[in-house]
Image (spheres, grey):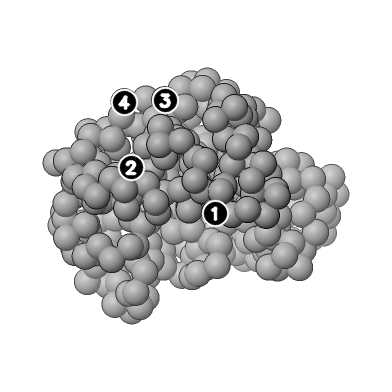
Amino acid sequence: MTSHYGITVPFDGVSLPEHRDWFHRLADLGYTDVWSAEVDGADGFTPLTLCAAWEARLNVGVAVTPVYTRGPGLLAMSVAALAEVAQGRFTLGLGASSLPVVELWNGISYEEPFAKTRDVLRFVKRALDGEKIDDVFDTFEVHGFKLSRPVLVRPPILLGALRQGMLRLAGREADGAILNWLAASDVAQCAREVGEGKIIAARLFVIPTEDVDTARFIGRRMISSYLTVATYAEFHRWLGRGELLQPMWDAWNEGNRKLANEVIPDSVVDELIIHGSYAACREHVARYVDAGVQIPTLAIVPFGVDLTEAIEGLAPR
């Protein structure tokens, strides 16, 4: 199907120390990558450091670490340390994240997300290349910083990108883009903005059940939680789903969460959430790959599914 086939860690209900055996099992089953997130669970780097140290067959990546929540120097140090542990198997994902994560949970003003992402990207690239940086960027300034443990090879850097500006920045100045919350049919529109010769990764939400009603019920709750955030709402307007999702946005803004879920069309759920039998889920993943996703990363949605069974059933064939 593809030379990369990833899964999101850490797994819910599994402690970080217990992941050691899971990492070995993932590699045995043919998974090539494990990718973390950084929202409200584990930080993005710790699970990957453990994996890189324990299982040399797996690539590791973070999708994404917010550009606001670490100072530029600390971010460069964190990246350099993980790159040293992973020895060529690490991909960094940077992104603006969202106002709730940055401002409401971390007390940092969510201002100029495009400029901040661009500036942090430029700083991190220069820092990882061993440069001593004394510079004033548009959104911050750094004076006299230089990594004392230089990185032998700078890891690929991807940008979490949703719309044209960030997608184009990913194409111009990064090694590619990380996509999220989109249908397989949307990949080409995003990839065109990034340009040729760049890496396209995507996190894909998977509910492995043949109970369609349950899958759609869970999927609707996820969609209303995510796609009512302004950045995701604008992303889907750009993708052409404005008319389909407007009733959800209206109900959400009126405070009617129940109605917001009810008015999401089945077709939208089925496009954005992978569900069905294991064979059907793998076929859906393959559609993303055929559309241009080079690093598909599954995120198993916990709803009572047996984790061992799901990982085995979703493994590449």
Mark found first going from the N terminus, 3 or 1: 3
Q: Which amino acid does label 2 sit on?
A: Ile
Mark found first going from the N terminus, 2 or 3: 3
Check residue 41 in the rendering and tell me which mark sits there, or answer none: none
Q: Is mark 2 on a helix, strand or loop?
A: strand
Q: What residue type is labelled 4?
A: Asp
Check residue 274 in the rendering and tell me which mark sits there, or answer none: 2
Name the residue rendered at 70%, 68% in the picture. Answer: 106
Q: Is 37 placed left or right of 20 in the picture?
A: right
Q: In which quarter of the image is residue 4?
A: top left
What is the spatial separation of the Cα atoms under label 4 and label 1, in whole angstroms? 36 Å
Where's the N terminus, which quadrant? top left
Mark 3, mark 1: which one is toward the viewer? 1
Mark 4 lies on residue? 290
Tell me if I can see residue 115 in this picture. yes
Q: Which amino acid does label 3 sit on?
A: Ser
Whether residue 149 is situated above or below residue 88 in the rendered picture: below
Name the residue rendered at 36%, 69% in the picture. Answer: 12
Name the residue rendered at 40%, 36% in the picture. Answer: 266
Q: Which amino acid does label 1 sit on?
A: Lys
Mark 1 lies on residue? 258
What is the spatial separation of the Cα atoms under label 1 and label 2, in whole angstroms? 23 Å
What is the spatial separation of the Cα atoms under label 3 and label 1, in whole angstroms? 28 Å
Name the residue rendered at 35%, 66% in the picture. Answer: 11
Mark found first going from the N terminus, 4 or 3: 3
Q: Which of 35 and 182 is in front in this view?
A: 182
Residue 86 location (% of width, % of height): 39, 59
Residue 291 location (% of width, % of height): 37, 25
Tell me if I can see residue 153 in this picture. no
User: Mark 2 near mark 3, Cβ–Cβ under 8 Å?
Assistant: no
Check residue 185 in the rendering and tell me which mark sits there, or answer none: 3
